[in-house]
């Protein structure tokens, strides 16, 4: 058996709350000043939110309004989970200063804002060109979020184990925060039906092992159960744990940071290679040095699934993509992206994003 597992988390998970706040700040700044340099991280615990980092912009974001908008989108009552203090809004601390002039010196010339490695991955096993267990886990949480039951709260995790030799799901795990007025047996049938629905949408088996809140009650959740921090769920942001993960987080950064922009371009390249029929599966690694325009290395791995000579594929990439930070930003129009669309449920496999076109 060759069983691989992918995970995803809901928008009410404390780490995801932080990602959403950080990306809402990025989007707000770029909307008003496309030259904004943003490197923002958030921390949340209970009803306390800390926003920290570097910001150089002619725009001064209204941090309170941005935080309120994120909590409103998730659902105040779902995040608060019975804690009235959150209904009035969290306590916010701001620790933000301008970007280092030393970093700006290299970035202003078009070079990368930092060293780093970024990966892009694509596979033809789903219409989204994403790993199938990752898409099933993600779809489960999206359906769950829109379920009308009063029993469910905002914090949830899903994990799907898939046997690539047989093409079957072996185990489907979820942990769902719920009202203190119910027990797992009260909603198990609902969760199991959503598991079946998510699997069925990808024409998969539904006779897998179903694990629903295996520890029992999950009443205290979100920031009241765990401290949340921006950029701590890279597998959930990318490919669920299948394929490599780059060295830096994506959220909270303007596209001059290659952690974000190069990860999007690497996905675009991998996706184009698979869509062109050159390979069934592809992973692209891009490596950059601070202040340098071109990547110091480009590596493409098709895992033996290629239908073209590897040199042909490498030449195709060299001749068709500008991999300088400015070239990536221009090609993908990254200064005009609504990053609120990628701050939860993954940065890839979604329609309407330039790196998915």
Image (spheres, rainbow, N blue to C red):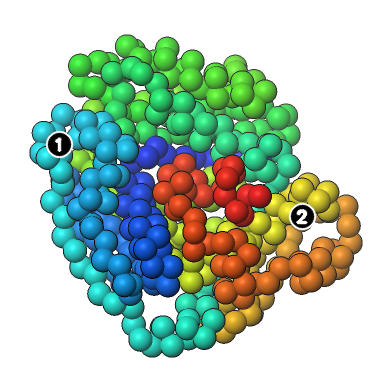
**The quadrant where residue 97 appears:** bottom left
Horizontal arrangement in the rendering, residue 65 relative to residue 132 (left or right): left
Residue beneath label 1, please? 87
Residue pictured at 76% horizontal, 67% vertical: 320
- Element type at mark 2: helix
Residue pictured at 88% horizontal, 57% vertical: 308
User: How packed is label 1: few (under 14 Cα within 10 Å), some, or many (20 or more)?
Assistant: some
Q: Position of residue 176 (x, y in %)?
A: 35, 28
**The quadrant where residue 251 appears:** bottom left
Q: Position of residue 173 (x, y in %)?
A: 46, 29
Residue pictured at 60% horizontal, 61% vertical: 332
Horizontal arrangement in the rendering, residue 39 relative to residue 143 (left or right): left
- Element type at mark 1: loop
Rendered view: 179 above or below 328? above
**The quadrant where residue 287 appears:** bottom right
Horizontal arrangement in the rendering, residue 250 relative to residue 199 (left or right): left
Horizontal arrangement in the rendering, residue 334 relative to residue 34 (left or right): right
Rendered view: 19 above or below 160? below
Q: Which quadrant does the N terminus fall into?
A: top right
Residue pictured at 51% horizontal, 49% vertical: 347
Residue beneath label 2, please? 273
**264 and 183: which one is in front?**
264
| Tag 2 and tag 1, C-beta contact below 8 Å | no
Q: Would residue 243 be visible to someone looking at this image?
A: no
Give the distance between the C-alpha atoms of the residues marked 2 and 1, in whole angstroms.
48 Å
Say which label, 2 or 1, has the lower sequence index. Answer: 1
């Amino acid at each position: 058996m060759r069983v691989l597992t992918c995970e995803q988390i809901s928008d009410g998970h404390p780490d995801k709350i932080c990602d959403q706040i950080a990306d809402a700040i990025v989007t707000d700044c770029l909307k008003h000043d496309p030259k904004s340099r943003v490197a923002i991280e958030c921390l949340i615990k209970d009803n306390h939110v800390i926003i920290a980092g570097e910001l150089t912009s002619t725009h001064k974001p209204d941090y309170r309004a941005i935080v309120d908008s994120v909590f409103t989108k998730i659902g105040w009552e779902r995040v608060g989970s019975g804690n009235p203090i959150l209904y009035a809004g969290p306590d916010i601390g701001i620790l933000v200063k301008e970007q280092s002039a030393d970093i700006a010196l290299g970035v202003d010339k078009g070079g990368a804002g930092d060293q780093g490695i970024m990966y892009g991955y694509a596979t033809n096993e789903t219409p989204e060109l994403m790993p199938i267990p990752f898409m099933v886990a993600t779809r489960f949480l999206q359906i769950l979020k829109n379920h009308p039951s009063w029993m469910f709260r905002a914090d949830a995790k899903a994990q799907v184990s898939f046997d690539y030799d047989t093409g079957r799901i072996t185990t489907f795990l979820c942990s769902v925060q719920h009202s203190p007025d119910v027990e797992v047996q009260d909603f198990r049938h609902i969760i199991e039906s959503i598991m079946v629905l998510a699997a069925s949408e990808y024409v998969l088996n539904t006779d897998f092992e179903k694990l629903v809140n295996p520890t029992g009650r999950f009443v205290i959740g979100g920031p009241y159960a765990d401290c949340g921090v921006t950029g701590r769920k890279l597998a959930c942001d990318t490919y669920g744990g299948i394929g490599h993960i780059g060295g830096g987080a994506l959220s909270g950064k303007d596209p001059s940071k290659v952690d974000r922009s190069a990860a999007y371009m690497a996905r675009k390249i991998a996706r184009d290679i698979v869509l062109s029929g050159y390979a069934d599966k592809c992973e692209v690694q891009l490596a950059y040095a601070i202040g340098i325009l071109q990547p110091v290395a480009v590596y493409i791995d098709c895992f033996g699934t290629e239908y073209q000579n590897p040199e042909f594929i490498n030449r195709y990439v060299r001749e068709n993509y500008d991999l300088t930070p400015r070239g990536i930003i221009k090609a993908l129009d990254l200064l005009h992206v609504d990053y609120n669309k990628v701050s939860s449920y993954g940065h890839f496999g979604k329609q309407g994003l330039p790196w998915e076109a």
